[in-house]
Amino acid sequence: PHHYLVTFGLTGTPDFKNEEALQAGQHSFNCMRECVRLCVDAGRFRSDDVEQIAQSYWACLHGVVMLLITKCDFPFIEQNRLIDSVVDMALEGLRKS
């Protein structure tokens, strides 16, 4: 959780400048964007806007990760069940009918 928080939670804030963390985050996002592009090219998604899909999917996944990291006192359901549910809902929203 600490690596994720540094890479995706603190970078870009006015008081935190770490080029290595910024590059790691961008590399991770680029890998996911490439996976999205492959799915778009294969006709798996109802939209062909790779950037919109990648950013929307990342926002969804980032939200659940940050909640799990920062809201430890919240009575979440079992962690893997929550993550699977979020991933499934996000993918279902993207899939071509």
Image: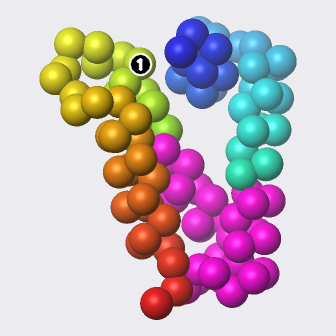
Report how many numbered discs are placed on residues in the image. Answer: 1
Q: Position of residue 92 (x, y in %)?
A: 43, 71
At x 76% / y 69%, what residue is drawn?
Answer: 37
Q: Is residue 73 visible?
A: yes
Q: Hey, which quadrant is residue 5 in on the image?
A: top right
53 relative to 80, above or below: below
- Amino acid type at circle 1 is Ile
Q: Is residue 10 visible?
A: no
Residue 15 or residue 64, whichever sits in front: 64
Q: Position of residue 1 (x, y in %)?
A: 53, 15
- Magenta segment, which residues? 33-61
Q: Position of residue 71 (x, y in %)?
A: 28, 18
> Would you name the residue on which mark 1 appears?
69
For residue 15, side relative to residue 22 (left or right)? left
68 relative to 36, above or below: above
* Residue sticking out furthest to the left: 75
Q: Hey, which quadrant is residue 16 in on the image?
A: top right
